[in-house]
Image (cartoon, helix red, strand yellow):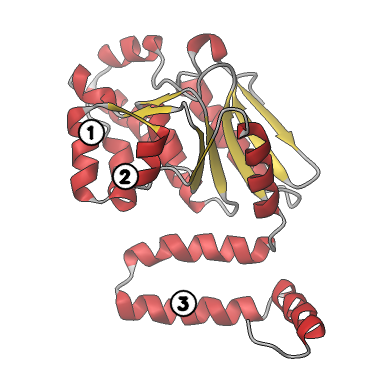
């Protein structure tokens, strides 16, 4: 695996993927995007992995695109630019379809493509001093790849405001908007993140995998179709060994109560 990305799996089944370009504020380039794809694929094929945590080394989560990458983009033609853009889009799609929950652990700055990367995570845990933003408009650029995700998370009006103004905003505002799941104080951040990830990893993996898949599958379904698909997943879940074991344990404890 590329030295640009560090990967570690702990005993609880949390695979931590750490962007490792601290001297560049973990700015994205083609090599780092490729390394992320490889790391996610590795985590998906490892049965011991239950949760994927995405972090940044050094003082920031991810500052966006590498300056050298921007210079390269400026000299590329339309077809090259389209191929390059599709590569980042493929990463976001891979995160969406990944069988494990992906948790962004954000400290410092998450800007432009870095904010897009955080937005593409299923859940985001932010340190209180984290800073977010989609400032691409100031360069005459469009944060187009994150737009599909952003409008689902915050709604059309807020999404347009965020990308059209290009303003930076703090972790509290990001939580209010729905981009961040939990905000923790600087002092408690590491411990709270470990506890959150540990609790998530302790859940039956089959249930979490099915829940994530259904949540995003509902995007393409109307109300009635969504209910029908929900019924199918409900029935599938009942047939898993994890569900049967869970029901047996519950009945043994309660002598037949209701969930």
Q: Does residue 229 show up? A: yes
For the point 55% across and 79% down, which residue is it? 234
Q: Quick one: label 1 or label 3, which is nearer the N terminus?
A: 1
Image location of residue 199, percent across then percent down: 68, 53
User: Mark 2 falls on what kind of element?
Assistant: helix
Image location of residue 214, percent across then percent down: 48, 66
Q: CA distance from mark 1 to mark 3?
A: 34 Å
The 10 Å Cα crowd at callout 1, few under 14, some 14 to 19, many 20 or more, is many
Residue identifier under label 2: 150
Image location of residue 103, percent across then percent down: 55, 43
Say whether marks 1 and 2 touch (CB < 8 Å).
yes
**Lateral position of residue 218 relative to residue 24, left or right:** left
Q: Quick one: label 1 or label 2, which is nearer the N terminus?
A: 2
> Which labelled disc corresponds to residue 230?
3
For the point 58% across and 54% down, which residue is it? 99
Position of the N terminus by quadrant: top right
Q: Quick one: label 2 or label 3, which is nearer the N terminus?
A: 2
> Which labelled disc corresponds to residue 163?
1
């Amino acid at each position: 695996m590329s030295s640009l990305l560090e990967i570690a799996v702990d005993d609880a089944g949390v695979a931590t993927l750490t962007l490792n370009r601290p001297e560049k504020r973990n700015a994205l380039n083609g090599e780092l995007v490729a390394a992320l794809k490889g790391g996610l694929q590795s985590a998906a094929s490892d049965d011991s992995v239950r949760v994927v945590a995405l972090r940044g080394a050094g003082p920031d989560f991810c500052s966006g695109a590498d300056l050298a990458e921007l210079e390269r983009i400026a000299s590329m033609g339309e077809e090259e630019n389209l191929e390059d853009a599709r590569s980042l889009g493929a990463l976001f799609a891979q995160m969406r379809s990944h069988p494990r929950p992906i948790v962004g652990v954000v400290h410092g700055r998450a800007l432009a493509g870095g904010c897009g990367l955080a937005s593409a995570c299923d859940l985001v845990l932010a340190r209180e001093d984290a800073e977010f933003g989609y400032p691409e408009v100031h360069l005459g650029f469009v944060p187009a790849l994150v737009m599909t995700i952003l409008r689902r998370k915050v709604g059309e009006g807020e999404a347009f405001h965020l990308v059209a103004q290009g303003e930076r905003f703090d972790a509290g505002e990001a939580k209010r908007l729905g981009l961040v799941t939990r905000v923790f104080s600087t002092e408690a951040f590491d411990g709270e993140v470990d506890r959150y990830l540990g609790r998530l990893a302790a859940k039956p993996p089959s249930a979490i995998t099915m829940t994530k898949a259904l949540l995003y599958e509902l995007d393409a379904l109307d109300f009635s179709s969504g209910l029908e698909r929900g019924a199918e997943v409900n029935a599938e879940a009942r047939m898993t060994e994890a569900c049967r074991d869970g029901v047996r344990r519950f009945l043994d404890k309660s002598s037949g109560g209701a969930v």
